[in-house]
Amino acid sequence: MGSLSVDMDKLMVRAQLGGHSLAFKMCQNIGSLGHGGYDTVEDVHVSSCTFKGTVNGVRIKTWQGGSGYARNISFEKIKLIAVDNPIIIDQFYCPTGVGCQNKTSAIKLSDITYSAIMGTSTAEQVINLKCSQSVGCTNIVLNRVYISSTTPGKRVYAACYNAHGRATNTKPAVKCLLK
């Protein structure tokens, strides 16, 4: 199963009681890749979205043990208002947190761009790029990403695992990206 050439533009996403709207799922999450085995996603462009009071902002999540690829994905002109987890790549997804195994096969993530993303987070870790131990993520680009805490003066930070790419004009600094 695959998705090709998907554009999402000008969506407003708000936290809701009792579930999430379709726009919420579409705007924020490229996910559950690899759960059924082989998956491909490419040419996905998310632009001009606002996240207000949500658990996640822009997220790519994959199950361990899957195969395939997700590439040429961009998130741009994103506004964040009190978002718990603004930018996430999670290649160790395990919803129960019990019996999670570190498998060697994974979806290959590449050519992912985050541009003109600004706003606030309720958490300290505002950028979390957690890529597969065996495959890793390549050509991750962050440019003009500015995320601060909802608490004035509270420091925020980025964390990476096996994520390769570059970051320019970004606060917090993303020094953890590998070349």
Image: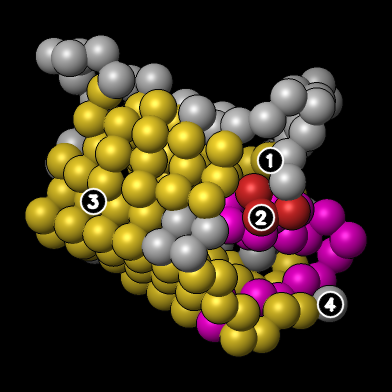
How packed mark 3 is, by other alpha carbons closer than 10 Å (few <14, some 14-19, many 20 or more), is many
The circle on residue 23 is 2
Q: How many marks?
A: 4
Please provide the residue range marked out in magenta: 25-44
Give the vertical position of 160 relative to 149 (above or below): below
Disc 1 marks a residue whose amino acid type is Tyr
Disc 3 marks a residue whose amino acid type is Val
Q: Nearer the viewer, residue 36 or 154?
A: 154
How packed mark 2 is, by other alpha carbons closer than 10 Å (few <14, some 14-19, many 20 or more), is some
Q: Which residue is at 18% across, 57% downward?
A: 144
Q: Position of residue 61 (x, y in %)?
A: 63, 50
The circle on residue 1 is 4
Q: Give the labeled residue for mark 1.
A: 93
User: Which one is earlier in the sequence, the residue at label 1 or at label 3?
Assistant: 1
Q: Give the labeled residue for mark 3.
A: 145
Q: Position of residue 163 (x, y in %)?
A: 39, 54
Disc 2 and disc 1: Cα gap in Å? 22 Å
Give the vertical position of 84 relative to 146 (above or below): above
Query: For the residue labelled by badge 4, is the local secondary structure a helix, a strand or a loop?
Result: loop
52 sits to left or right of 166? right
Q: Which residue is at 84% across, 77% downward?
A: 1
Q: Nearer the viewer, residue 177 or 3?
A: 3
Disc 3 and disc 4: Cα gap in Å? 32 Å
- The colour scheme applied to this rendered structure is secondary structure
Q: Which residue is at 56% across, 77% downward?
A: 7
Query: For the residue labelled by badge 1, is the local secondary structure a helix, a strand or a loop?
Result: strand
Residue 178 visible, this orientation: no
| Front tag of 1 and 4 | 4
Q: Position of residue 101 (x, y in %)?
A: 75, 36
